[in-house]
Amino acid sequence: MAKRFVIFLLALALSPAAVLAGQKAIIFPFDLIDQQQQFEIGLMPKGLDPEDKRRLEIITDELTKLVRDSGRYEVVDRTPIAKDIEDKSPMYKCNGCEDDLAKKVGADIAFIGTVRKASDVLFTVSIYVRDVANQKVIHQGSSEIYGNTDKMWLRAVNYIVDRRLYADRGAK
């Protein structure tokens, strides 16, 4: 009986969540890739739609909450580097600068998110998890959504986290 208990404790100690516990993570704000604007030849870019901007903030907050609540990482405050983030955005185009920014706040892991807007109702939400020290993506997940509501965007983030990024938890 004692042998089984020791094996159980070893398995628990070596689980992915236990191995990652203690690592610090930064959640960068989601960026929008508006493909509609990229194909409007001869027209001036419209800039970020206020509703899209608001939804990007909502899903960034949701991802932050999910990562924090998972217990896998200690989420660090990005406020000290907010100006740097603004200057270097969008993160998906900064050629590795996210690793340098993450190091500034002591993060081991960086979460980068994008929303690719193909039309007013077709979006692809993607989340990339980077190992800052090794400067490489260690996890990635995406979800297509057909609809442009807060609920749809939030559902995509929850799906990616539950079913793609934290695969060891199993599908629910």
Image (cartoon, rainbow, N blue to C red):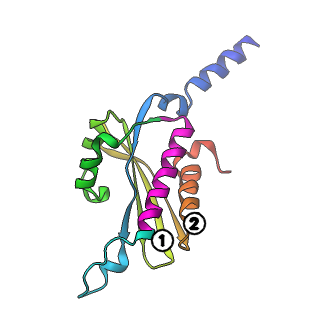
Cβ–Cβ under 8 Å for marks 2 and 1: yes
> Which range of residues does the magenta coloring cover?
52-73
Q: Earlier in the sequence, mark 2 or mark 1?
A: 1
Residue 11 x, y percent position in the rendering: 61, 25
- Classify mark 2: helix, strand or loop: helix
Residue 94 within the segment the image draws in magenta: no
Gap in angstroms between the C-alphas marked 2 and 1: 10 Å
Identify the residue at image location x=31%, y=78%: 46
Q: Residue furthest top?
A: 2
- Point out which mark residue 73 bears: none
Identify the residue at image location x=52%, y=51%: 62
Q: Amino acid at mark 1?
A: Phe
Res. 134 visible in picture? no
Mark 2 or 1: in front is: 2
Residue 70 within the segment the image draws in magenta: yes
Q: Amino acid at mark 2?
A: Met
Q: Residue furthest bottom?
A: 42
Q: Is residue 81 above or below residue 7?
A: below
Residue 168 x, y percent position in the rendering: 58, 42
Identify the residue at image location x=48%, y=71%: 123
Q: Is residue 63 above or below residue 71?
A: below
Residue pointed to by mark 2: 152
Seen from the viewer's position, the closer of residues 72 and 90 is 90
